[in-house]
Image (tube, rainbow, N blue to C red):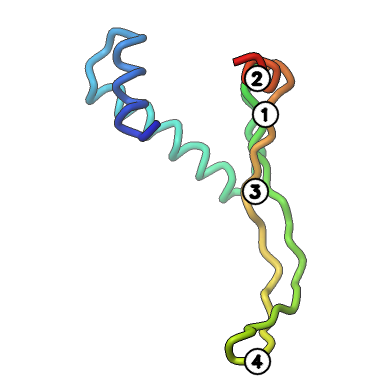
Amino acid sequence: MTKIELVKAVAEKTGIDQPTAMAAVEGVIDTLKEALIGKENVYIRGWGTWTLKHRAQKTARNISKNTTLVIPAHDIPYFKPCKDFLEAVAKA
């Protein structure tokens, strides 16, 4: 499902027009991004949790040039679905 398809589905389910649905979907996405950039976790009951996972610094190899490079420590976003959501997907 693409973002446009999501917007159309939200517009149909809620009965609002597509520009309003687009603003709502973009608002949710932007709010999620801002919270994670601010190192906040996002908990949505019945859906799941967005958190950050820390990756430690590591050494990697570039096989084609036969060199090593250091990948610095960084955080990555991580989504953990809730139990009810996992069960619903498993039944489908």
Spot occupied by residue 55 in the image (x, y as percentages of width and height) = 73, 61
- Real-space CA distance between mark 1 and mark 4, rounded to the nearest whole angstrom: 40 Å
When asked about the image quadrant of residue 60, the answer is bottom right
When asked about the image quadrant of residue 89, the answer is top right
Report the residue marked by disc 3: 39
Q: Which of marks 3 and 2 is nearer the N terminus?
A: 3
Identify the mark at residue 81; answer none if there is no mark: 1
Front residue of 59/41: it is: 59
- Real-space CA distance between mark 3 and mark 1, rounded to the nearest whole angstrom: 19 Å
Mark 3 or 1: the one toward you: 1
Q: Which amino acid, by three-letter code, is at mark 2?
A: Phe
Question: Is residue 34 toward the left or the right of residue 46 in the image?
Answer: left
Mark 3 is surrounded, within 10 Å at the Cα level, by few (under 14), some (14 to 19) or many (20 or more) other residues, namely few
Please determine whether, in this image, residue 58 is positioned above or below residue 40: below
- Real-space CA distance between mark 2 and mark 4, rounded to the nearest whole angstrom: 45 Å
- Real-space CA distance between mark 4 and mark 3, rounded to the nearest whole angstrom: 36 Å
- Real-space CA distance between mark 2 and mark 1, rounded to the nearest whole angstrom: 6 Å
Question: Is residue 80 toward the left or the right of residue 34 in the image?
Answer: right
Q: Which amino acid, by three-letter code, is at mark 1?
A: Pro
Q: Which residue is drawn at 58% across and 87% down?
A: 64
Q: Residue at x 67, y 42 (%)?
A: 51
Please determine whether, in this image, residue 59 is positioned above or below residue 44: below
Q: Do the residues labelled 2 and 1 touch (CB within 8 Å)?
A: yes
Front residue of 79/31: it is: 79
Identify the mark at residue 85; answer none if there is no mark: 2
Q: Are marks 1 and 4 in contact (CB under 8 Å)?
A: no
